[in-house]
Amino acid sequence: MTGGRAWRVVWAGLAAASMAGAAGCVPEVAAVPAGSAEAASGAVDDSAIRLRLNARLIDADPAMFKDLSTVVYRGRVLLIGAAASEDARTRAGAIADDVEGVREVINEVQVAADGGVGSFISDVVIEKAIQAGYLFEGAIDSANFRVRSVNGVVYLIGLAANRDELDRALAIARATDDVKAVVNHVRIAPEG
């Protein structure tokens, strides 16, 4: 993707995200068919899990909360960010594992010094470029994926409708400017 095209994609993604925010959408909630029982309970459950987990992280160590990000998708928790030590990384995983409703903890916290503002901005640009790529790819339902980047490493979590959708989502993430690696935690929905 060329530099000019990448920025157009980023701006389109930012515009779409702004419109979603203005419409009252909550970006961390798992997408499921409207009107389904799972839509009513799953979205609330993921939001409640995320709130409980963030409260526990703040109680344990406000600095830990500041340096970590939590993504919850259907009871699966993805922890990302930077920790000062392996002990802090392990502690964050143990806190998440102890939160009511958590089915699985995926601890992708990097042991590293804070990346700083420049790293944060670069990660936001990467995330928005990938999300915009998903919006414009007809074979991808962008609601099936959560995208986060830490120091240029992209983490995906979600539930792809099929192998083709997952492969296309991974290809877009890998082709995005400044992505160093893509870590896939997306599952494929069972047939039927």
Image (cartoon, helix red, strand yellow):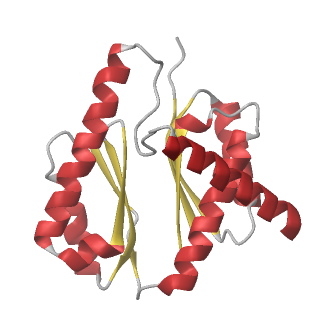
Q: Is residue 71 above or below residue 88?
A: above
Q: Is residue 189 above or below residue 3?
A: above
Look at the picture and state if 35 lies above or below 146: above
Q: Position of residue 99 (x, y in %)?
A: 15, 49
Q: Quadrant of the N terminus?
A: bottom right
User: Depth check: 100 or 41 in front?
Assistant: 41
**Image mark count:** 0
Residue 103 visible in rendering: no
The spot of residue 7 in percent (x, y) is 78, 64
Choose top left, top right, bottom left or bottom right for residue 66.
Answer: bottom left
The residue under the point 28% across, 33% down is 44
- Where residue 74 appears, as percent x and y from the top left, is 35, 35
The image quarter containing residue 140 is top right
Position of 28 compared to 181: left or right?
A: left
Residue at the spot x=32%, y=29% of the render? 42
Instruction: State the image quarter where residue 114 is shown.
Output: bottom left
- Residue at point 29% right, 45% down? 104
Q: Is residue 183 something one can see in this rendering?
A: yes
Q: Is residue 115 left or right of residue 18?
A: left
Name the residue rendered at 64%, 64% in the picture: 126
Determine whether, in the image, residue 3 is placed left or right of residue 79: right
Left or right relative to 161: residue 12: right
Q: Position of residue 113 (x, y in %)?
A: 40, 88
